[in-house]
Image (cartoon, grey):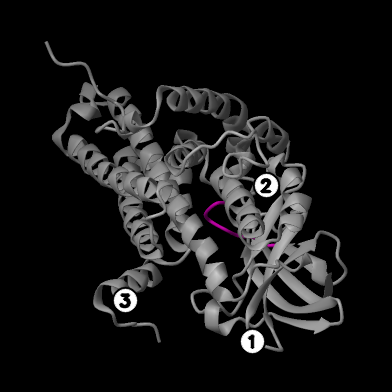
Amino acid sequence: MPKPANPTPDFFGYADLLSDAERAELATIRDYLENEIKPLFDASWERAEFPFAAIEKVAKLHLAGYAYPEYGDGRHRGPLFSGFLNLELNRVDPSLGVFSGVHTGLAMGSIHGGGSKEQRDRWLPDMAAMRKIGAFALTEPEGGSDVAGGMRTTARREGDTWVLDGAKRWIGNGTFADLVVVWARDTADGQVKGFVVEKGTPGLTATKIEGKIALRTVQNADITLDGVRVPEADRLQRIGGFRDTAAILARTRGGVAWQALAVAVRAYELARAYAVEREQFGRPIGAFQLIQDLLVKMLGNITAMFGMVVRLGQLSATGRDTAEQAALAKAFTTTRMRECVAWARELFGGNGIVLDYGIAKFFADAEAVYSFEGTREMNTLIVGKSITGHSAFV
């Protein structure tokens, strides 16, 4: 008798490192996301629309407060749980993961890490409850990887007011965010500073980027700042320069590694299910050697990715993680993810290029995950400097 199939992509049981209570909580979240949230996002991808009805539903899970217990339910959950939670969000839809990551990781993370206590208390309770949604405006039309030294958006102080001028691009949640964290270079001292700009502020304009082939549900925006006046009270008081901004990005970069794992996991799950159901030549295609080879290569990548992100989570829990480790995790996992989605799409044959079977969306979305939060090349150079002592940045 053949052994029962083992369909789990967590082949080495990394989830066993969580407590029973954590696994039970994640199972409840998974069921809710699959039944209540996934249908809304599935219906929105082709139309390139955001399912705003999902915000109230997601808010019921109190996910935005998990990383900030003093503004959430008061219960501390460690980085490993947060990583597996990230996996669950992105297994449902990477656009959901981006919406959550921008709001919770980048926008709330900027305020939590860079704001004064008064600013944290003023903004984070509403953001944790998702009564107000955040965006993070760093990337510029003419500056991506070089934004640290080449930021063109400026901030000029006039008394107790700052005047912001410039442009930002690829700003997730940008078309509808209530609070936009804008990064700009101070014309007086040349340092990058952070500002929280409220929706509707005169001079702030957000225009949806059209024609995307990936993460179509995410509402990326081109943002222009034309004489936007922001009070000193809305400047993030603990941001002293781009080094502080980079520290926020380093924390969220590890989250993108989990997102890449999630995309690969979903691709594998879809491919495996299709392989055992789809019949050719009178038998399931999963019985053929070449199909099994594709699945095993995917599973090998996923297992290696699990090992890296889980260890990064363990290091983060004890404060021993580094920006270079996050960079390596992002570069490695997104590269392996790209292989996995390509193999999965290959397994589906012609059915892999239509949305009906699910894999086409993840195949397309993987391209965006591969590029944002630092390209593979830039993250490689961060690690390269760490291991050689020499910077290859131009």
Name which of mark 1 and mark 3 comes first in the sequence: 1
Mark 3 Cα-neighbour bin, 10 Å: few <14, some 14–19, many ≥20: some
Name the quadrant of the N terminus. Answer: top left
Residue flagged by tag 3: what amino acid is it? Answer: Lys
In the foreground, 72 or 318: 318
Residue flagged by tag 1: what amino acid is it? Answer: Gly
Q: Which mark is residue 190?
A: 1
Residue flagged by tag 2: what amino acid is it? Answer: Glu
Mark 2 = which residue? Answer: 49
> Which secondary structure is most common in the magenta stretch?
loop
Q: Is residue 308 visible?
A: yes
The image shows residue 204 at horizontal and vertical percentages of: 80, 68
Residue 232 lies in quadrant: bottom right
Task: Give SS at disc 3.
Answer: helix
Q: Are marks 2 and 3 in contact (CB under 8 Å)?
A: no
The total number of labels drawn is 3
Kindly identify the residue that appears in the image at 68 percent across and 35 percent down.
59
Instruction: Identify the magenta region.
Output: 208-217
Q: Are marks 2 and 1 in contact (CB under 8 Å)?
A: no
Name the quadrant of the C terminus. Answer: bottom left
Task: Give SS at disc 1.
Answer: loop
Mark 3 = which residue? Answer: 385
Residue 61 lies in quadrant: top right
Residue 178 lies in quadrant: bottom right
The image shows residue 369 at horizontal and vertical percentages of: 46, 55
